[in-house]
Every structure is written in structure tokens, then in C-alpha cells.
């Protein structure tokens, strides 16, 4: 009988020793695949976030703040331009010359600088939204007061008061928006706010066409036109109900600091007074300079474009330079 041939070793026995290494390699490949899929998902998520329009990232509260500042500036422009619309009737009624006509317009602009300084301080002390309501009330009452003028001097006085409210509105509204909106979209918000001036100009022209064109009012139609200028005061009710103070201002007021520098002392101090004056000679107004100095939870800061610079750093830099 011939012996049976010996069978060869089974491959499974040989693979048994290599099994752990093979399985580890398989798990590593699976992990790499999972990481690749995760990275792809992250990229898709980032790409989807980048495609979201910027205005959808703004909260309802931030939009309300912007509309409050924009419509405040629009109504401010309306009250300011009512004088330009009624200048013809005013000259016939009071019999003043071109020089006085120019003075009535100039006094409003000059006093707007005073208003920017005054309400810049009020906004820091009592709140941005409260200051905004105060400015609207001031120029609205001033327009109503101008309607009661019996002499050119009285008209000049009311136009000066209106200028205080006009300058204060921009200082208060711009700071309120800049402290509420994210820095990446702050320039857009300020531009939207600034466009309110053109709308106010248009609104003043429409009111003048409706009021001054009525022959039944005679030569005193300008009085009723100025009376229409008190209507913006009603807008303060909406602001009072729907616009809150910025969180940065509330945090600052929660812990009052006696050692913090006065922003006016900084920008008009020996180190920065030259830059402040030269800045006002350009296309910016004094209210813009003061309005850019604002209080945050970390103390006073100077808003430079989209960057907030602590006032302490400004003082150190200016002293060193």
C-alpha cells in the first residue's frame, strides 16, 4: 500500500499571524476615509455659511437700532430743509436781505457742532437711545417754535436751537449704531443711516409743495410748514419702546470708574488737539470726532474704521509721538 501524500498547510494558518496587522491597516484606512469625509463636510458647511447674505446675519434688534438712527437723521434733514423751502415767503414776510438769509442758514450749521459736543456727553452719561430721543425732541420743538416767530431775531434763535438738535442726532445715532452692529458690517450700517438725509430732503420738498402752494394760507404758509416739523417728535415714542441701550454701555454704567479719562480731555488735550483741529478741517465734522469716542465695558475707546482702540493706548501713542 502506497503512503498518502502529506497535505500542504492551510493558508488560513499562515494568514492568522498576519491578521492583526491587516486589520489594523484596514482600520487606519477607514479612519483616513472618515477624516476625509469630515473635512469635506466642514468645507461644504463653510461654503454654505459664506453664501449666506450679510443682511441675514443681522439680528432684529440691530436692524431696529439702524432704522431708529436712519429715520432720526431723515427727520432731522427734513426739519433743516424746511427753511430752505420757505425762504421765499420768509423774505417777503420779514423783509430781510441776502445777508440775513445766509445768517439764518449758517447759525444752524454752527450750532450743530455745539450740539454734537453737548449730546456726545449726554450719550455717554445717560445713554445712546435717550440722547437720540432728546435730539429729535429738540429739533422738533425748535421747528414748532420757529412757526411762532414774530421777528427775525426770534427766528434766528429757534434756528440755532434746531442746529443743536441736528448735530446731536448724528453724534448719538452714529455711536448707537456703531456699538450695536458687528464691526464687519459697521460701514454698511453708517452708509445706510447717512442715506436718510436725502430722504429727508425729499420729504421737506413734498411738504412744501403741499403747504406753501395753498393760497388760503396767504403769506403765512411758512408757519404751517414749520408746524409740520414737530411731527418727528412722535417718533421718539417708537424709539422708547423698541430700541435698547447697547450692551457695552450698560456694562460700563454697571461699574462706574472714577479713574477713566475724560474723552474731551483726551482729544482736546495737548497731545491730540492738533490732530483734532486738523481733522475738522477736512470732510468730517466735529460731531464725527466726538462721536467716534465711545465708552465700552473696557473703558473709553476710539473707533478707527472697524477697529476700536482703547483711549489709554491713544494717550500712550500720542505722548510718545
Image: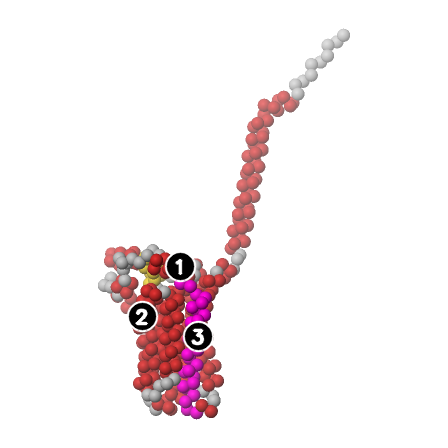
Residue at horizontal 33%, vertical 79%? 160
Q: The C terminus is located in which quarter? A: bottom left
Q: Are marks 3 and 1 in contact (CB under 8 Å)?
A: no
Of labels 2 and 3, earlier in sequence is: 2
In this figure, which residue is indicated by the disc labeled 3? 234
The answer to whether 267 appears left or right of 204 in the picture is left
Residue 253: image location, x then y, percent: 34, 60
Circle 2 — which element? helix
Residue 205: image location, x then y, percent: 45, 81
Q: Within 10 angstroms of label 2, few (less than 14), some, or many (20 or more) residues?
A: some
Q: Is residue 283 visible?
A: no
Of labels 1 and 2, earlier in sequence is: 2
Q: The N terminus is located in which quarter? A: top right
Residue at horizontal 62%, vertical 24%? 15
Task: Give the camera-side residue of 78 and 123.
Answer: 123
Circle 3 — which element? helix
Q: Real-space Cα distance between discs 2 and 3?
A: 23 Å
Task: Give the camera-side residue of 8 and 60.
Answer: 60
- Does residue 187 show up magenta in the picture? no
Residue 298, picture quadrant: bottom left
Residue 317: image location, x then y, percent: 27, 57
Q: Within 10 angstroms of label 3, few (less than 14), some, or many (20 or more) residues?
A: few
Q: Which mark is residue 247?
A: 1
Residue at horizontal 55%, vertical 38%? 32
The span shown in magenta is 218-246
Which of discs 2 and 3 lies nearer the camera? The answer is 3
- Does residue 221 show up magenta in the picture? yes
Q: Real-space Cα distance between discs 1 and 2?
A: 22 Å
In this figure, which residue is indicated by the disc labeled 2? 118
Residue 191: image location, x then y, percent: 43, 67
Amino acid at each position: 500500500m502506497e503512503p498518502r501524500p502529506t497535505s500542504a498547510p492551510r493558508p488560513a494558518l499562515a494568514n492568522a499571524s498576519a491578521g492583526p496587522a491587516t486589520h489594523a491597516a484596514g482600520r487606519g484606512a477607514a479612519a483616513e476615509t472618515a477624516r476625509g469625509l469630515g473635512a469635506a463636510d466642514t468645507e461644504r458647511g463653510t461654503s454654505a455659511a459664506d453664501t449666506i447674505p450679510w443682511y441675514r446675519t443681522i439680528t432684529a434688534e440691530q436692524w431696529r437700532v439702524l432704522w431708529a438712527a436712519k429715520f432720526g437723521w431723515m427727520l432731522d434733514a427734513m426739519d433743516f430743509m424746511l427753511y430752505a423751502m420757505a425762504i421765499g415767503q420768509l423774505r417777503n414776510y420779514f423783509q430781510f436781505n441776502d445777508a440775513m438769509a445766509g445768517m439764518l442758514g449758517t447759525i444752524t450749521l454752527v450750532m450743530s457742532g455745539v450740539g454734537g459736543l453737548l449730546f456726545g456727553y449726554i450719550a455717554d452719561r445717560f445713554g445712546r437711545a435717550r440722547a437720540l430721543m432728546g435730539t429729535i425732541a429738540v429739533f422738533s420743538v425748535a421747528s414748532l417754535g420757529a412757526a411762532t416767530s414774530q421777528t427775525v431775531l426770534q427766528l434766528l434763535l429757534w434756528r440755532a436751537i434746531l442746529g443743536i438738535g441736528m448735530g446731536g442726532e448724528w453724534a448719538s445715532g452714529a455711536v448707537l449704531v456703531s456699538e450695536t452692529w458687528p464691526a464687519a458690517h459697521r460701514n454698511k450700517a453708517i452708509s445706510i443711516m447717512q442715506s436718510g438725509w436725502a430722504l429727508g430732503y425729499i420729504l421737506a420738498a413734498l411738504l412744501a409743495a403741499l403747504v406753501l402752494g395753498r393760497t388760503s394760507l396767504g403769506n403765512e404758509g411758512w408757519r404751517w410748514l414749520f408746524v409740520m416739523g414737530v411731527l418727528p417728535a412722535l417718533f421718539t415714542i417708537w424709539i422708547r419702546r423698541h430700541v435698547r441701550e447697547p450692551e457695552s454701555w450698560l456694562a460700563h454704567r454697571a461699574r462706574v470708574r472714577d479713574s477713566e479719562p475724560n474723552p474731551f480731555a483726551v482729544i482736546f488735550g495737548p497731545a491730540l488737539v492738533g490732530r483734532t483741529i486738523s481733522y475738522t478741517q477736512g470732510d468730517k465734522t466735529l460731531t464725527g470726532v466726538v462721536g467716534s469716542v465711545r465708552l465700552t465695558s473696557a473703558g473709553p475707546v476710539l473707533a478707527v474704521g472697524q477697529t476700536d482702540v482703547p483711549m489709554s493706548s491713544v494717550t500712550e501713542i500720542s505722548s510718545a509721538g
